[in-house]
Amino acid sequence: MRSRNPVFSRRGFSRDNGYAGFNAAPQAGGPAVATQGNPYAQGTQGTPYAQPVGNPYAQNPYAQQDQQYGAPPQAPATTGRMTMDDVVIRTASTLGVLVVTAALAWALLPVDDANIGRSYGIGIGAALIGMVLALVQAFKRKASPALILLYAAFEGVFLGVVSSVVDNRIADGAAMQAVIGTMAVFAGVLIAYKAGWIRVNRRFYGFVMAAALGFVFLMMVNLLFAVFGGGDGLGFRSGTLGIVFGIVGIILGACFLAMDFKQVEDGLAYGAPREEAWLAAFGLTLTLVWLYLEFLRLIAILNSSD
C-alpha cells in the first residue's frame, strides 16, 4: 500500500495490490491460496504450502500449512520478525537524531538581525536535502537505516532553525507549546485507536488521502503566489484562513498517525521482517514532523494576530 503520510509515495507494510492492509486479515478455516503480488509468499495455489490471502510477509513456506485444516492463522514464530520493541527502538533512534540536530541548530545558528539570513538559508537548504532523502527512501524497495537517519539529521537542522525563529522573534515558548501539542495528539490518537474509536479502512484511507492531496495542492499554490506575487500569497497561511488551515493540517496529521498505527499493527500481525521496523520509524517521524510544523505555524499565526 502506498503512503498515508505527507510523503505520499512512502511504501507501507501491505504489499499486495490495492488496500490489503485494511480489513484483509486471513480468515481461519478458509482455503489456503497464494497472495497476489506478494514478494514474500513462496507457496502456489492449491499446494499445502500456499500462503493465506492478505499476508504479505509469509516467508516460511511451512509457516501456514495448518491453514488448510482450519487452524487460525498466526505470524511465523521465527527469528528475524519485527516486534513492537523494534519499532519503539528505531523510532526513538530516528527522533533522537532529529532532536539532537535541532538542538545544535538552535544553539549554533543565531537568528538575530545580523545572522538570520544565513541561518535561514542553512535551514532551507537542510529542508531541501531532507526532502530529497525522504523521497529516495520512499521509492526504495527496502528500508535504508542510514538514509532514514540522515533524513532525520537534516530535518532536525531545519526544525531547529525554524523553531528558533518563531520562538525568539514571534512567540516566546512557541517551540515547547508545539512539542506539547504534538505529544498530546500522538497520545490521544493512540488511545482512540487502541480503544477502537478510530477504524482505519478503505473509506477512511480514501477520504484522508483525498483531503491530504487537496491540502498540499492548495499550500503549493499559495506558496507559488507568495514567491512570485509577494506578501502572504492567497492568504491560506495567515489570518483567519491560516488558523482554519492550521487546524485542518493538525487533523490530517492525526489521521496519518492512525494509519501509521494500522501499518505497525498489520506488520506485527503478519510477521513482517525486522528491517521493516525502520519503515515504521520513518513513517512516524514524517507524521510527527508534519504535526509539529502545523502546531508551530498555528501558534505563530495566533500570536501575529494579537
Image: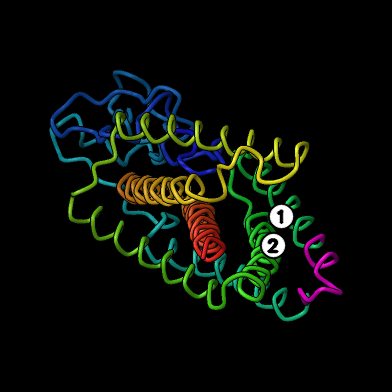
In this view, 141 is above or below 98: above
Residues at badges 2 and 1 in contact (C-beta under 8 Å)?
A: yes
- Of callouts 2 and 1, the N-terminal one: 1
State the residue lying farthest toward the bottom.
107
Q: Which residues are magenta?
A: 110-121
Residue at position x 50%, y 58% from top?
Answer: 298
Q: Is residue 209 magenta?
A: no
Residue at position x 25%, y 34% from top?
Answer: 23
Residue at position x 37%, y 54% from top?
Answer: 78
Circle 2 residue: 158
Left or right of residue 198, residue 106 in this image? right
Label 2, label 1: how far apart the Cα atoms are:
5 Å
Q: Nearer the viewer, residue 268 or 128?
A: 128
Q: Nearer the viewer, residue 278 or 260?
A: 260
Q: Disc number at residue 151?
A: none
Q: Nearer the viewer, residue 75 or 157?
A: 157
Q: Is residue 119 magenta?
A: yes
Based on the displayed image, in which of its 4 quarters is residue 167 positioned? bottom right
Give percent across and percent down for residue 230. Answer: 75, 43
State the residue lying farthest toward the top.
46
Element type where label 1 sits in the image:
helix
Kindly tell me whether residue 174 is visible in this rendering: yes
Kindly tell me whether residue 279 is visible in this rendering: no
Element type where label 2 sits in the image:
helix
Circle 1 residue: 127
Check disc 1 and give the amino acid type.
Ala
